[in-house]
Image (cartoon, coloured by chain):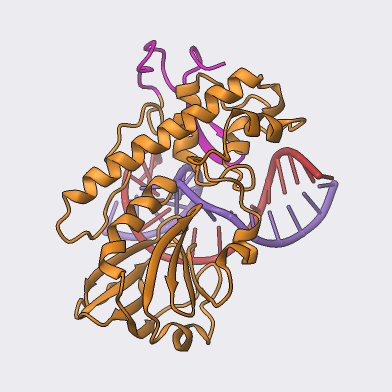
Chain colours: A orange, B red, C purple
Amino acid sequence: MPELPEVETVRAGIEPLLLGRTFVAVTVRNGRLRQPVTAGFTPAVTGQTILAVARRAKYLLIGCRQGTLVVHLGMSGVLRVVPAATPPLRHDHIDLLLDDGQMLRYSDPRRFGLLLWTDSDPLQHPLLAGLGPEPLSTLFDGAVLHAAAHRRRVAIKALLMDQRIVVGVGNIYASEALFLARIAPERPAATLSQAQCRRLAEAVKKTLTAAIVAGGTTLRDFHNAAGEPGYFAIELKVYGRAGEGCPRCRTAIEQRRIGQRSSYFCPHCQH
DNA sequence: ACTGGCTCCTGAGGGC
DNA sequence: TGCCCTCAGGAGCCAG
């Protein structure tokens, strides 16, 4: 369930449960993920003490004394801290046993996610080195977006989801941000004016921030911090609402495929 | 250098 | 009930 807000919610949820803990054992039931879990994974992680739980783009970075555990949730990945005795279900692929009787459990039906260990700077890892700016930082704004869109003919929605341009925006929040900015998702990126790029960059920040706040609220209600945030926490204005009335003008929301992904928009107020 | 299309994988839901 | 199709919140890889 992962776009940036969901990953951030997971990060915030597991951080207090992991800080200072040590991984005492690792069980890999099925390591065939997007990148297969390597033979060196278990010995590398075992014995490591957790010093930080950070996030870069949609990657979780669990910083340990001698390296970093990098986790990506893919489409369907879930990370939870549960009692060590919890019996595994079908898609509970990896357990990382902690020194307090709990374990960090990775589940992922579709197995598009990944776990890897790196003992050097995780930000320099090939998977992360080419990532664009964090959307909520000052490194991302209208000017940056406008520069990135220069001469690009791709649909603006596809550009928004390109992690080399800006990270963290997935299929749901791309539709939501474009709705908020009143920009049609199919517009070739290069046709957006500076003002429109400014509006869109602000809409991205606003959309993601609202979702993080909502996720955090949801999580606080979860006593076990099990992290079942999800998209129910926030009211989506257009995503998944084909045929329903636009919240602004009541025109029927349209659904269309853009770059193999379902996109939702109001044909009347988005241009 | 870009662009669009395909691919990995399992599960859910709709139509017949 | 079963079968077949389509779709799903990601992103790397490939040919043109």
Which residue appears at 52% of the width and 86% of the height?
A40
- Can you give x and y, in whole percent of width and height, for residue A232 in the image? 28, 41
Which residue appears at 50% of the width and 70% of the height?
A33
- Residue A255 drawn in magenta: yes
- Can you give x and y, in whole percent of width and height, for residue A74 in the image? 47, 58
Q: Compared with residue C2, is residue A143 higher up or lower down, i.e. above or below?
A: above
Q: Main secondary structure of the magenta part?
A: loop
Residue A242 falls in image quadrant = top left
Which residue appears at 63% of the width and 64% of the height?
A124
- Number of numbered discs present? 0
Front residue of A196 and B14: A196
- Which quadrant, please, contains the C terminus of chain A? top right
Q: Residue furthest bottom?
A: A43
Which residue appears at 43% of the width and 82% of the height?
A45
Q: Compared with residue B9, is residue A176 higher up or lower down, i.e. above or below?
A: above
Residue A207 visible to an observer of this rendering: yes
- Can you give x and y, in whole percent of width and height, for residue A125 in the image? 62, 67
Q: Seen in the image, is A205 located left or right of residue A158?
A: left
Q: Compared with residue A97, is residue A253 higher up or lower down, i.e. above or below?
A: above
Q: Which residues are magenta?
A: A243-271
Q: Seen in the image, is B15 located left or right of residue A118?
A: left
Q: Compared with residue A243, is residue A98 higher up or lower down, i.e. above or below?
A: below
Q: Seen in the image, is A203 located left or right of residue A130?
A: left
Front residue of A259 and A58: A58
Residue C2 falls in image quadrant = bottom left
- Can you give x and y, in whole percent of width and height, for residue A79 in the image? 34, 64
Residue A232 visible to an observer of this rendering: no
Front residue of A209 and A187: A209
- Residue A159 drawn in magenta: no
